[in-house]
Amino acid sequence: MDTLNILVIDDEPGMRAGVARALENFTVHLSDVASEVGFRVAQAGSGEEGLGRIEAAPPHILLLDYKLPGICGLEVLDRVAQAHGEILTIMITAYASLETAVTATKRGAYDFLAKPFTPDELKSVIRKAAARIVLAREARKLAREKRQVRFQFISMLAHELKAPLAAIQGYVEIVRNRQAGDDPAAYEHMLDRCLIRTQGMSKLIYDLLDLTRIESGQKTRNLAALDVREVASVAIEAVAPEAAERNITIDLQIGGPVPMVADREEIEIILNNLLSNAVKYNRPQGRIEVKARLEEDKVALSVADTGIGMTKEERERIFADFVRIKSSKTRDILGSGLGLSIVKKLVLLYDGKIDVESEPDAGSTFTVTLKASPPARPAETLME
Amino acid sequence: MAKILLIDDDVDMVEMYKIILTHRGHKVTAAYNAAEARALMKKRAPADAVVLDVMMETATIGFDLAREIHQKYPKLPILMLSGVRGAKDLPFKFEPDETWLPILKFLEKPVSAEVLGAEVDSVVSKK
């Protein structure tokens, strides 16, 4: 339970004691942030004493009498607003005129209590102030976390862009200075590698654009009836040359049309990513099976390969940004590390999920389950 | 001629460093991840110097490996390749402390052929 500190500045000891008594065992439950708040009340009999206490230990909430001997309430309010803007000040006054309320609010008071007030009136004002403090605190925490996530993402991205640049730069320097001996084949090989790494960088940039477009909600979604089988056969065409190079066969095991309502581009991105992985992480002469079927109101779409597979620990990591499985078996495989994060985010737009079954050296099966008639939600809901 | 152990997860970086160092007359062994590096370290004196990348399977695995190598072979010099300009650029908390000690020098990536070659030569000639 959180405890908020309250300071009461009032020259009437009875009033101070009454406030302390009313709030002694009072708690506020904030369901929005699942938080329970209690209060600790300190007292001061004059503005001077109050300011001293505030300097020593600033409270969260200040209950401040308007009419005080010595320094008056408004003067205290001014000084608090200046030096401790984060304190919520509630003015207590016997002269509850609109004018005093306006003056005090202009000078930084958060709320008002008119004397005489009941314990319930006091509690209601305190509840409002507590909610404001806790929610503001929560918002600051979220903003901080968001900045941290963004920093991590950008740092990883910078690393992923610097790696191919360093390779290209290094190769070009060796070629330019003829540092690899006299065999022209060695130089040709290095230039080929430069081209491959350049393609890798382009892929990363395109994936990054896809990802940010999806996350920011900037992508226009065109939900329309389509046949998953037809989209799958087009996606297979796209990876066919790469698969053929390594004698990998791709089997489209979908008997008839599988109708659903979807944004065609999104289904293409999902299939392209899963198929591209199934080719890249397959073994030569391997197989890929693509299946899709309607299960009640859902479409289950799966891509199975006979490739290197994954351990349990690897399976758990692969959906995070920039995560790529690094082992002796994946050494020569290039990728942006964003493909599966993109798939995972798209699947959420269809109230769906993605599962993976895998066994090292046997292969992996990725299955996405999507609502066949998804809600037409804008992509920015993903951010919430 | 010296034996150099290269540890980097990027095939091209390994290939490039191999070309450079082989041309300078060194014998190069490569490991592409921590598991391979650990396997190589089990053998006696795996090299005269180690060139090691920071970010591989995880963002900090290079530091872990440096510590392990140092524990096993305290006299083996380690050159650390790093894609960051210093601790402030790291996407994780890293406080410089005694764990930096086994690392002889940080080389900021991209490291040119000349720089890497010269650094390795200078390290092995001191042995």
Image (cartoon, coloured by chain):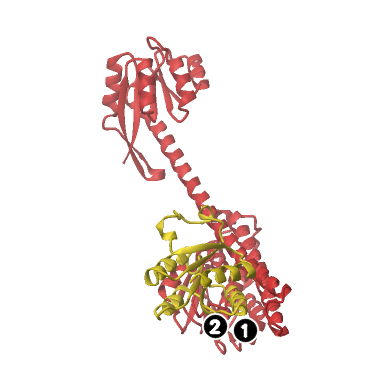
Chain colours: A red, B yellow
Q: Residue at x 58, y 70 (%)?
A: A270
Q: At which x and y percent is residue A306?
A: 51, 84
Q: What mark, if any, has residue B92 been given in the picture?
A: none
Q: Which residue is mark 1?
A: A243
Q: Chain of mark 2?
A: A
Q: Who is closer to the viewer here, A146 or B82?
A: B82
Q: Quadrant of residue A133?
A: top left
Q: Quadrant of residue B26?
A: bottom right
Q: CA distance from mark 2 to mark 1?
A: 9 Å
Q: Residue at x 43, y 28 (%)?
A: A88
SS at badge 2: loop
Q: Amino acid at mark 2?
A: Asn
Q: Is residue B92 visible?
A: yes
Q: At which x and y percent is residue A197?
A: 65, 72
User: Would you say the residues marked 2 and 1 are in contact, meaning their CB atoms lie under 8 Å apart?
Assistant: yes
Q: Chain of mark 1?
A: A
